[in-house]
Each structure stands twice: as structure tokens, then as C-alpha cells.
Amino acid sequence: MDAIKHIIQDHFTAPPYSLHDAHIIGMQTDANTLTLLFDYGYLETTPPYDQVQGNIRISGIQWDFCHMYLLEYTDVLCGNYGHFQGKKLPLQEFITTAAQISMHVIDETYGYHQLKLSGFLSAGTSMQECILEICYTDPLCYLIEEA
């Protein structure tokens, strides 16, 4: 009988801040760097779970693998079960064509060189469900404003 080698992968470390319920109000690009601008920051993931004001800078962006998915519901309120229409855009195109970005983050997922944010994008009186995929090579940099 052949031996079976077991390789156990530990969980990824928890991020120092949670983006759940964060509000992205803009995205700035500079070459292969993307900065997510937040309205009121985000929460620490360790006690005392304080709210901090800040943004996130992501360097080493792999633009060919960064996308924005937009889902527009046709017969139910946004976010409920039902039919929707949608489109997938290169993130750079989305950033340059979106007049005003207002994304309410519901969930965040981290993987190998990848960050996915899902939530709701509002533009005027309309709301769409969205998924933001960001592929990068450098560590995330939380830019915390000192009090």
C-alpha cells in the first residue's frame, strides 16, 4: 500500500481591519497602484474594535485580472433572490467611466494575491449589487490617519 502524504494549509491570517460596512467613495490609480478611498474608514479586528479613519493602498496591481461585476435586478429589489442583468468590466474602465463611486461593502474575501469585495453600488437613485475583484502582488497598505 502506498503512503499518502498529508499537507495541511493553515488559515490565512486575519486582516488587521474589517471592511464590512465600510463605504468606498472613490478609487485613485497611479501606474500599478490602486488607492481605495473610504468615507469613514473601517474597524479594527482586535479589541477594542475601534473605528479608524483611513484608506487602503494596493501596489503591484495586475490590471488584466481586476474586474467590476455589476448586477441590476429586473423583478425584485436589489440584493434579493430573482432575475438580474449584469456586466463585467475591466476595473480600469469602470474607474474612468464611473462619474461617482459609492460602494457599500458587505463582504470581503482574501486569497492568494487577490481581494474580492462584494456589496452595493449606488449611482443617483439606482442601486446595483457589485463584486470588485483586485489582483495584486505587493502587501496591502492601510493608510491610517493619526488623530
Image (cartoon, rainbow, N blue to C red):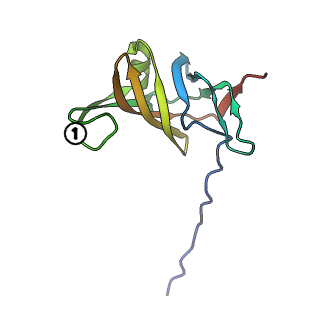
Residue 144 x %, y %: 72, 26
The answer to whether residue 17 is above or below residue 33 is below
| Residue name at image x 54 percent, y 17 percent | 29
| Residue 111 shown left or right of residue 57 in the figure | left
Residue 52 x %, y %: 69, 29
The residue wearing badge 1 is: 83
| Residue name at image x 74 percent, y 45 percent | 47
| Residue name at image x 42 percent, y 14 percent | 96
Q: Quadrant of residue 44?
A: top right
Which SS class for mark 1?
loop
The answer to whether residue 99 is above or below residue 104 is above
Name the residue nearer the viewer: 21 or 113.
21
Q: Quadrant of residue 110?
A: top right
The answer to whether residue 139 is above or below residue 6 is above
| Quarter of the rendering occupied by the C terminus | top right
Residue 8 x %, y %: 60, 65
- Identify the residue at the far right of this view: 147
Amino acid on which disc 1 is placed = His
- Identify the residue at the far bottom of this view: 1
| Residue name at image x 49 percent, y 87 percent | 1
Q: Is residue 72 visible?
A: yes
Residue 26 x %, y %: 52, 18
| Mark 1 neighbour class, 10 Å CA radius: few under 14, some 14 to 19, many 20 or more | few
Name the residue nearer the viewer: 147 or 117.
147
Q: Is residue 116 visible?
A: no
